[in-house]
Image (cartoon, helix red, strand yellow):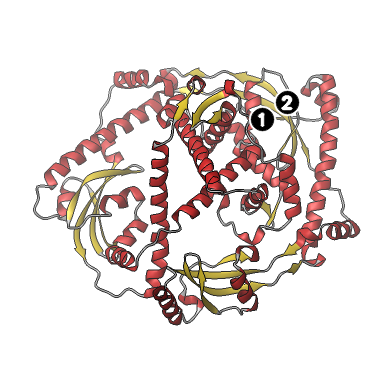
Amino acid sequence: MFDFLRKGATSVFAKTFLAVIILVFVFWGIGSFVTSERDLVAKVNGIPITAKEFQEFYNFQLFRLKQAFGEINEEDLKKLNLKKQVLDELIKMKLLEDYAKKLGIKVLPEEVSLSIAQIPSFQENGRFSPQKYQMVLKELGTTPKFFEKLIYYDIVQQRLELVLTTPIVVSDEEVKDYLTFSKQELDLLEGVLPLKTCIEKISYTEKDLENYYLAHRDIYKEEEKVKLIYLVVPYETSVEVTEAEAKRFYEQNLDRFRKPFRAKIKTLIVEGTDDASLKKAQKLKSEIKSLNDLKIEARWVEEGALPDEIKLVLKQAKEGQILGPFKVSSGYIIIGVEAVKPEGVASFDEVKGDIYKFLKTEKIRKVTQEKVNKIYSEIMKENDLKVWAEKNKIKLLETDWLTKKDFLNLFQNPQVAKKVFEAPKREFLAPFETSKGFVILEVFDKKPARSLEFAEVKEKVKQDYLANKGKELCEQKVKSFLEKAKAQKEIAKEIFEKEGFTVKEHRLTRLQASQLFSPNVAQLFATVGAPKLIESFTWEKDELKVFAVKAIKNFNGTISNIEIQQTGSTLLAQKRDKWFKNWYQNLLKASKIKTYSLFEKF
């Protein structure tokens, strides 16, 4: 769920500024949602899902959709069935949490704090920043309490998956079969039919456009708009931090600057704990001559994540060593050591730059907030932002007409956007924080949403009509072509060209095909076992594509043990993921789910 935030996260940051992190989260709390019998959306196995939970999660998902695709109309939301998706996700959270509790799996608040601290989006210079945490969550349209609850559920699922899927293994024979198949060489023909070639053949009348407009009138709307006047109180820049203040902060917060032992390592695991697995691991290690032989990305690990035996060996290891095999719960592990960093406390000189920046930021924010609060009090007395500005000879900033999306692009604050579009004309809002300073704004004017007349959107209607009709024509043409072509004894490039396709020829392995083409396209010929025309088509942007497998050449080369080991890790992850999804579906089928009338009102 949080890959978009976690990308690049490593455990190296986990304990940095830990005291600050925990204070932040204790203050906000890893809150539980309020349960009320009058406030239920659904129950799963007797576990309540409240309207508050549902609304918060719905808003969170809706905001993410809008950030990705812009404003979404009611028709699109119905097609997405977002309400059902949100309820399904909440049901999943509740069921997994309940099952985890039955197995004795627990997640502590400190673990949630550490997990959040490792997310790069919340860090500055590699360290957790409470200010950035709050700013990013504002951009995501959610609160710390709600986000921490989502992270909690995320950890529960990860842990449950680990416990339930650990016994699942992948045999060498499975891996060899997969590699032999994926190394088969394919000769492909890719027929491309651009949408524009079909559009060029469409004729239309004014009446056709008018009828199309009437049938799709609900999509031709002008959104609600506002015009704003506002004042930016920038962050002060004249504050100073003395060396004495920085040293005092360092001495009073030494725990924040402790550096645990950590190592950057590459790992290979041989599944199984019997003698045969041990011999296999020993043989594999003997074939590894250097770190370069391990075609695996190295990762940083801290001592808290290491078994005692491995931790002791790593503390004495040298960079470039290949260690092991070591016995672990699921088999034997081989470790390549890329770098080792001993434990200790960062010196003042190492961290003073960060301390100065941290203390200066805190001072600047405090001084600026005091200044903006004073200004806001004066504006409240006048009860008019513009009047106050004229009296104080301050020029306010003005916007053009803004939609909600425009507002978010300008201020990145969904909570304020909601207030602005709900506020009446000439109302001013309390100060809110941005990356440049604090903002006080007034809703100077408003335009309600309205349906656009045909004359206003005629050009857009024309584009939509032609795209729609052109797509229909392209698909009809491709279906006709497939009927003719499948009767041909031999698949040839000329067959495609005769029907107006642009043809591309490819020679590549199945694995390369999955990397070159999109998943939708690659799926068309992923399991084809003999030369044939693929009797289906796919759209990619504004191109309609048809494929044929002209020839398949079997792989007859050798597969190394290292290749088996590395590919085995990927297949194992896929196999466990598939098993867990099937397991959850069975858990869901066996569950009792009851929805309440309140759900239908959303």
- Tell me what residue is drawn at x 78 percent, y 62 percent: 351
When the figure is inspected, residue 65 is found, relative to residue 505, above or below; the finding is: above
For residue 429, the mark is 2
Q: Amino acid at mark 2?
A: Leu
Q: Nearer the viewer, residue 97 or 405?
A: 97
Residue 508 is drawn in which quadrant? bottom left
Q: Is residue 597 left or right of residue 397?
A: left
Marks 2/1 in contact by CB < 8 Å: the verdict is: yes
Residue 446 x/y as whole percent: 62, 19
Q: Is residue 499 left or right of residue 344?
A: left
Q: Is residue 72 left or right of residue 134?
A: left
When the figure is inspected, residue 182 is found, relative to residue 458, above or below; the finding is: below
Residue 391 x/y as whole percent: 85, 24
The residue beneath circle 1 is: 416
Question: Is residue 441 visible in the rendered structure shown here?
Answer: yes
Is the residue marked by circle 1 packed among few (<14), some (14-19), or many (20+) residues within 10 Å? Answer: some
Q: Is residue 373 left or right of residue 334?
A: right
- Tell me what residue is drawn at x 75 percent, y 36 percent: 438
Quick one: SS at disc 2?
loop
Question: Is residue 1 visible in the rendered structure shown here?
Answer: no
How many circles with numbers are drawn on the protein? Answer: 2
- Tell me what residue is drawn at x 61 percent, y 40 percent: 149
When the figure is inspected, residue 275 is found, relative to residue 437, above or below; the finding is: below
Residue 102 x/y as whole percent: 53, 44
Is the residue marked by circle 2 packed among few (<14), some (14-19), or many (20+) residues within 10 Å? Answer: some
When the figure is inspected, residue 111 is found, relative to residue 468, above or below; the finding is: below
State the CA–CA distance, disc 2 to disc 1: 8 Å
Residue 196 x/y as whole percent: 30, 39
Q: Earlier in the sequence, mark 2 or mark 1?
A: 1
